[in-house]
Amino acid sequence: MHLIPQSWSHLHMLVSVFPSVGLVFILGLYVTALIVDNKVMKLSCLALFAALAVLAVPTYVSGDHSMTVLSQNPKISQDAMSVHLGWGVVSLALLVVTGVAALITLWRGWGVKHVSENALHLVLGLAIVTLGLMVIVDELGFDISHHELQLDAATQKTSQIWSHVHMILNHFPTVGLVFALCFYLIALVADNVVMKRTSLVLFVICAILGIPTYVTGNASMWALTDPEIPGISKAVINAHRDMALVTLFGLAFTGVTAWIELWRYRHLGRFSNRSLYLVLTFAIITLGVMAETRHRGGQINHPEIRVATDILPSDPTAGWSANIELLINNVLWFVPWQTVHFFGFSLIFGTALVVSLRVLGFWKSVPFSAVHRLLPLGVFGVVMNVFSGMLILQADSFRYLNEITFVPKIAFITIGAIAVLYFSVAERLWTVKAGEDAPMSAKWVAALVLISWAGVIMGGRLLPYV
């Protein structure tokens, strides 16, 4: 199994992403718990902080042993490893301090009605500082073995910034899904409504983050293979892309099912156990696919994790991704998918416009709950566009990815999709009746939604012309 480490370097790659990326998600959950003042949710987050602190041990030990192995490679800078180790020790030590503080707060708050606010905010402050240090450590770690990031930009047809962004982004859906699953299981066992809703939101966010992750992965392929970089195989990259496509489908099934349950809860005031466990099933299956995807991604530029039994692909024209590229370049296939793509945008923007205008104060004779019923149309449009867009991208990915309007388009998709989540989780907005104004915070979100999806459409339409 790929989840069983084959070397110290392999173990370090598996565990080192959890402290930093995990902190991002746990901090989000923790801040939410403080805002809604949910004790079970607070205690669960404290337990997760303590679990992260435990991971500091295998992270340090595997990193120390990895340095011994990597020091034999003349391409690896000893100074870069030493600086990474120094910052790593400091950040891991602070992570342990955060975990201990969380564990003490958890123990002291277990049998009382209210957990100490001072202790809770102390843990929050320590976690934020730790996260800042972890960002520095991760950047220093990239410099050790990812020499493609230092290539001369003048010699590159596709910027290595795509590779850099992909290395950062690809950890978020994976690690996020792990922590979302942990939190979700606690929510199901504790039967805590707030935690269930929060976990479902996390599943949706992980699904949304899968879009820029997949796109930056395609761009990284061109950055690494045109011109070719010694030691990096297009065939190995295609094997990774194949599994990434399956992962995208898995994330979509998980995220859409989770969002539908959030939407249903708003109208019915209760969850469906069948739907909740369907989300759990999709999430577990997707996590298994992700594990394989990550392993294949690691094989691209990390020869230290390869073992003698690994049989790496050698044919750059084999695989689903390569064949989809050939197929979609046929006009017979390209035009129908482009039509679906345009129709999807019409659904998305039409829905976003109606809902956002009601929030901004138009047609106030309609309660917000009525326009909220339209949101599934927009979500259906997003699903149509994600899959049709990914197929269209394969037709001429090099050109699309190097167009100046493509980057803001993908950024606006991510921002706009996450912002729409607000409409299904905001308590005050849901109670807006006919004739009433929406809260000011909701109006800001509505404006962001409109700007984002207008930016997506503009970015897409300008692609053939700039």
Image: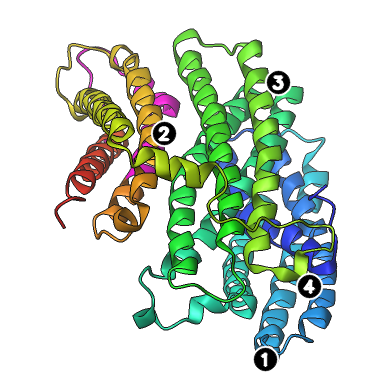
Task: Give the colour scheme of this rendering.
Answer: rainbow
C-alpha span from label 2 to label 3:
35 Å
Q: Earlier in the sequence, mark 4 or mark 3?
A: 4
Q: Quadrant of residue 155?
A: bottom left
Q: Nearer the viewer, residue 161 or 104?
A: 161
Q: CA distance from mark 4 to mark 1?
A: 15 Å
Q: Earlier in the sequence, mark 4 or mark 1?
A: 4
Q: Is residue 353 left or right of residue 241?
A: left
Along the polypeptide, which appears first: circle 2 or circle 3? 3
Give the SS element for disc 2: helix
Residue nearest the viewer, comparing 143 with 430:
143
In percent of width and height, residue 94 lies at 72, 68
Task: Please state the extent of the stretch shown in magenta in the rendering.
Answer: 413-440
Q: Which residue is mark 3?
A: 191
Q: Residue at x 50, y 59 (%)?
A: 166
Mark 2 or 1: in front is: 2
Q: Is residue 297 visible?
A: yes
Labelled disc at residue 311: none
Q: Secondary structure at mark 4?
A: helix
Label 4 is placed on what type of residue? Gly
Disc 4 to disc 3, C-alpha distance = 39 Å
> Residue at coordinates 30% horizontally, 53% vertically from top-left?
400
The residue wearing badge 2 is 387
* Image marks 3 and 1: residues in contact by CB distance under 8 Å: no
The residue that label 4 is drawn on is 63
Can residue 179 be spotted in the picture?
no
Q: Which badge, 2 or 4, is on the more N-terminal residue? A: 4
Q: Which residue is mark 1?
A: 79
State yes or no: residue 426 in magenta. yes
